[in-house]
Amino acid sequence: MKGRPVLVPAVLLLVLAGLVALPWWGSYFALFLATEMLILGLFAASFNLLFGYTGLLSFGQAAYFGTGAYVAALLLRDIGPDFVWVLVAGPVAAALLAAVIGWFCVRLTEVYFAMLTLAFGMMVYAVYHQWRGLTGGSDGVAGFSITPLVSGLEAVNLANPMHYYFLTLAVVVASGYVLYRITTSPFGLILKSIRENAERAAFAGIPVRPYRLLAFTIAGFFAGVAGALFGPFNRIAVPEMVHWTMSAEPVLMTILGGSHNFLGPFLGAAVFLGLRTWLTSYTDQWMFFLGLILLFLVLFLPRGLLSLAEWRTRRRGR
Amino acid sequence: MTAPLLEARAIRHFFGAFLAVDGVSLTVREGELTALIGANGAGKTTFYNIVSGRLTPTEGRVLLRGRDITGRPPHRITRMGIGRSFQITNIFADLSVLENVQVALVGHAGAGLRLWRAVARDQPLRRRALAVLGRLRLDHLAEEHAGALSHGDKRLLELAVVLASAPSLVLLDEPTAGMTPEETRAVVALIRELAADGEATFFLTEHDMDVVFGLAQRVFVMHRGRLLAEGTPEDIRANPEVRAAYLGEEVT
C-alpha cells in the first residue's frame, strides 16, 4: 500500500503532461485519436461507476451518450448557443433520461437489470432513428458549425482541432476528477457496499434502490458529457451513437482496462481505440483480430490491464 | 408501564401452503439476554426475518417499543434500532475491515449523500470505526481485506457491522455456527460482556445448548412453527414437553 500514493500520481502527471504537450509532439492524426480516446474514456469511466463500483452491468449506456450527442447537435443546428451551454444541456438531458429509465431499471439486478437497460436502450435508439422530422432518421443531425465556447472569447476557436482537443482534455480531466471524488466519498463507499452485498447494506440501514438510482443518474450525466463532446467532434449525431453496439464499447473498454481501478476504463478506451486504429490500417477484418486480442486479454488478465501495474506496486509496497 | 423493547403479536407466516410460523407471540424486555431455540425448520430464522423486515408476516404484528414496524423495509427497521446477523456470514468481502464498519456508520448517520469529502480523510469516522472494532478486538485487523479473515473473525466483523448501527436490539442468528470451540468460548464471553455493558439487548438463536444455557436469562422454544415453551434456562431444561419434542436425551 505504501508504494501507491507516490507512483500512481507520478505516472498520472506524466501522462497528463504528455497529453497537454501532444499538439507539439504528435501528428494531426494523433490529435484526433487522442480526442476520441479521452471522450470514450470518460464514457467508459461513467459506465464503470455503475459496473465496477455499484455492481450493475448496464447494456444501455449509449442511450445517455447518444442523447448528449443529439442534444448538442440539435442545439448547434437549430439554435446555435455558446458552446458552453451545449456542454450543460447535453449532460442534463442525459441525466434526466437516466433518472426516468433508471427508476424502472434499479428495481432489478444482475442479468435482469442488464436486459432492462438493453431494452430501454433499444427503445431510445428507435426514437432517434424514427423521429425523422427532428433527428433526420438514419442521416442524423449534421450541417452545423461549432459555436464559440463563450461569446467574446476570441482566443478560443473550437473549429480548430487543437482547440477542440484542449477543451476535451479539460472537460474530461475535470469530469474524471469529479467522478473520482465521488468514488472516494461516503456515497462511493455505500455504492461499493451495495456491489459487495446489497442485503447486508440494507441491514446496515441503507436504502439500496435510491442509491442505485442516484448512481445510475450520475453515470447518465457523465455519459452525456462524453456524448456532448463526441457529437460536435464528429460534426454529426447519428443513430449509431445510440445503438446497443455503442453500449457495448464501454463494457469492453472497462473490462480491458480493469473495472477495479478508477483509471482502468480510461486505459481500456485508449488501448481499444489504439488497437482498432492500428488493426484497420492492416486489414478489413480488424473486428476478428480485435476480438482475438480481447479474448486473450480477458483470459489471461481477467482483472484488466491495470492489474499488472497494481500487482507490481503492491509487491513494491510490501 | 413502558412498552417492552420487542413485542411479537400472534405472528403467522405461510410459505405457499406451508405454515412456517404459527401464532407466535413473545416479548423481549430491555437488557434481558434471550435465546430462541428449536430444531432445524422450527421457524426460528423465519421469525427473525419477520422481525428484521426481510419478510412481511401473513398475519400478526411486530412492535418495537410499542411502535408497529410490521412489514417495514430492512433499512428502516435497522435505523429504528434492530440489528441482525445472519446464519451464513454476511459481510462486504471485497472491502477492508475498517470500511465494513464505516459503511454501517455512514448508513446509520444517513450521511451517504455526501459526494465530495473523501472517506479516507475523515478522521472522526475512522476513529469511531476503530472504536467499534476495538469492542470486538478486531482493531488490529482494520486494514485487512474482510474476505481474507478467518471464519471466526468474519463472524465477529459482522457483529461489528451490526453494532455500528447503534441498535437497541441485536438478533444473532446462530452466532457460533462453524466456529472452533475456542472461538465459541471467546464469542460467548464477548456477547456476555457487551450485554453486561448495556451495548444492546441481545436475542439469539443457537444450536449449541451449552451456549444457550450459559448465556440466556430467558429462553423461548419453537417447535414446528409454534412457541412451545418459554422460561428461565432451568424451567426449559426441566420442561417435559421440551425434552420430548426437542432436547431429547442430550440434556442432563
Image: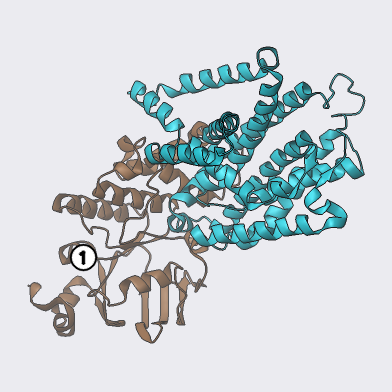
Chain colours: A cyan, B brown
Quadrant (top left, top right, bottom left, bottom right) of the C terminus of chain A? top left
Q: Position of residue A188 (x, y in %)?
A: 54, 42
Q: Please give the name of the residue rendered at 71% of the width and 57% of the height, measured from the top-left corner.
A: A124
> Where, by quadrant of the figure, is residue B102 drawn?
top left
- Residue B21: percent from the left, percent from the top? 35, 81
Residue A112, placed above or below residue A178:
below
Residue B50 or residue A52, whichever sits in front: A52
Q: Is residue A240 above or below residue B72?
A: above
Residues A271 and B49: in front is A271
Q: Is residue A29 left or right of residue A51?
A: right
Residue A249 horizontal side relative to residue B2, left or right: right
Displayed quadrant of residue B219: bottom left
**Residue closer to the observer: A297 or A50:** A297
Disc 1 crowd, CA 10 A, few/some/many (<14, 14-19, 20+): many
Q: In x, y percent, where is residue B75?
A: 50, 60
Q: x and y percent of residue B126 in the render?
A: 45, 36
The three-letter amino acid code for the residue at tag 1 is Val
Residue that label 1 marks = B212
Q: Tell me if I can see residue B38 in this picture.
A: yes
Instruction: Judge whether residue A303 can be spotted in this image.
Output: no
Q: Is residue B158 left or right of residue A254?
A: left
Residue placed most toward the observer, B149 or B69: B149
Seen in the picture, residue B83 relative to A226 is either above or below; the reply is: below
The residue sitting at the top extreme is A24
Most extreme residue toward the bottom is: B17
Chain name for mark 1: B
Numbered circles on residues, count: 1
Q: Circle 1 sits in a helix, a strand or a loop, which is it?
A: helix
Give the residue displayed 44% in from the left and 68% down from the top: B54
